[in-house]
Image (tube, helix red, strand yellow):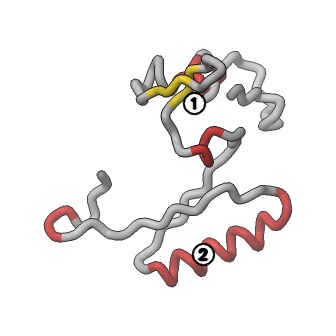
C-alpha cells in the first residue's frame, strides 16, 4: 500500500524522508516493524493481519472517553461531522485496564 502526498492533498514542498511513511505501513510491516508474515497461494508475501486492515486505509480516528456511552456519543458526532466523506472500515472497542495498570496504555 502506498499513500502518496497527493492523495492526502497535502501541499508540502519538502520531501518527507521517512520511507515507512512514503511506502505505507503494509509495505514496511514485515521489514521494519517485524510483523509476522504469510505467503498467499500466488506467492505474495504479506503481513499476517486481519483482512480488514489489508485494504487501502488513509486515516484513523481514535475516540476515547470515560465510558462506552461517552465514546459512542463522541463517535456518532465524528461520523455526523464527516458524513459521507469517509468510509468506516472497522470499529474496535476497548476497556480501561484493571488494578494498578488503570490509566496506563499497553
The single residue placed furthest to the left in the displayed view is 100
Label 1 or label 2, whichever lies nearer to me, is 1
Identity of the residue drawn at 76% across and 56% down: 87
Residue 12, position as x, y percentages in the image: 76, 27
Identity of the residue drawn at 67% across and 46% down: 59
Identity of the residue drawn at 62% across and 48% down: 52
- Relative to residue 70, is residue 2 depicted above or below? above
Please tell me how crowded label 2 is: few (under 14), some (14-19), or many (20+) other residues with Cα within 10 Å: some
Tag 2 or tag 1, which sits nearer the N-term?
1
Residue 58, position as x, y percentages in the image: 70, 42
Q: Nearer the viewer, residue 46 or 74?
A: 46
Tell me the SS state at disc 1. Answer: helix
Tell me the SS state at disc 2. Answer: helix
Residue 56 occupies which quadrant of the picture? top right
Residue 23 occupies which quadrant of the picture? top right
Horizontal side of 48 relative to 10 (left or right) equals left
The residue under label 1 is 25
Please tell me how crowded label 1 is: few (under 14), some (14-19), or many (20+) other residues with Cα within 10 Å: some
Discs 1, 2 touching: Cβ within 8 Å:
no
Q: Which mark is residue 74?
A: 2
Identity of the residue drawn at 63% across and 27% down: 24
- Relative to residue 31, is residue 8 depicted above or below? below
Amino acid at each position: 500500500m502506498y499513500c502518496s502526498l497527493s492523495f492526502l492533498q497535502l501541499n508540502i514542498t519538502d520531501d518527507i524522508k521517512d520511507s515507512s511513511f512514503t511506502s505505507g505501513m503494509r509495505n514496511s510491516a514485515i521489514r521494519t516493524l517485524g510483523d509476522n508474515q504469510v505467503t498467499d497461494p500466488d506467492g505474495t508475501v504479506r503481513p499476517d493481519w486481519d483482512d480488514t486492515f489489508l485494504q487501502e486505509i488513509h486515516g484513523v480516528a481514535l475516540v476515547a472517553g470515560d465510558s462506552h456511552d461517552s465514546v459512542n456519543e463522541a463517535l456518532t458526532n465524528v461520523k455526523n461531522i464527516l458524513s459521507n466523506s469517509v468510509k468506516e472500515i472497522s470499529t474496535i472497542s476497548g476497556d480501561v485496564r484493571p488494578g494498578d495498570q488503570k490509566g496506563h496504555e499497553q
